[in-house]
Image (cartoon, grey):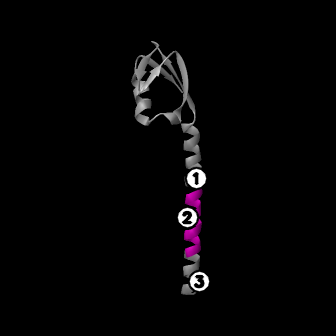
Amino acid sequence: MSTQEELEVQAKAKAEAKEKTKAEAKEKTKAEAKEETKPITVIAKRDGFRRAGREWHGTTEIDLASLKESELEQLKAEPMLTVIG
């Protein structure tokens, strides 16, 4: 095999690996997006209780994507709230 042929084979292999990586990243992004749009339920033990920049009343269902990671952690750590999901 000539040097030119070897370079072409290497370039083709590199291009195929790059496409595979792109496809894997796209699938990962889809899975993350699906996870983030999953609803969670927040139950307040006292109406009007405030946490994570929101006021909570009774049972509230919200999309996970509408919360920052730090806000979700605040909600989960708060004894006045029950987070399901």
Residue found at x 47% / y 33%: 67
Image height check: is 18 above or below 55? below
Residue found at x 41% / y 27%: 53
Residue at image mark 2? 18
Rounded to the nearest angstrom, the CA distance separating label 3 from label 1 is 32 Å
Residue range of the region highlighted in magenta in the rendering: 11-23
Report crowding for label 1: few under 14, some 14 to 19, many 20 or more residues within 10 A (C-alpha): few
Q: Which mark is residue 5?
A: 3
Residue found at x 55% / y 53%: 25
Q: Position of residue 72 (x, y in %)?
A: 44, 30
Q: Find out whether the residues at labels 3 and 1 contact each other: C-beta distance under 8 Å.
A: no
> Mark 2 or mark 1, which is nearer the start of the sequence?
2
Q: Amino acid at mark 1?
A: Lys
Image height check: is 34 above or below 29? above
Report crowding for label 3: few under 14, some 14 to 19, many 20 or more residues within 10 A (C-alpha): few
Secondary structure at badge 1 equals helix
Magenta part mainly helix, strand or loop?
Answer: helix
Q: Which mark is residue 26?
A: 1
Rounded to the nearest angstrom, the CA distance separating label 2 from label 3 is 20 Å
Foreground label between 2 and 3: 2
Foreground label between 3 and 1: 1
Q: Amino acid at mark 3?
A: Glu
Q: Position of residue 38 (x, y in %)?
A: 57, 33
Left or right? Give the position of 38 relative to 51: right
Q: Position of residue 6 (x, y in %)?
A: 56, 81
Q: Locate the C terminus and report the quarter of the image it occupies.
A: top right
The image shows a total of numbered marks equal to 3
> Mark 3 or mark 2, which is nearer the start of the sequence?
3
Secondary structure at badge 2 equals helix
Q: Residue furthest top?
A: 46
Image height check: is 40 above or below 7? above
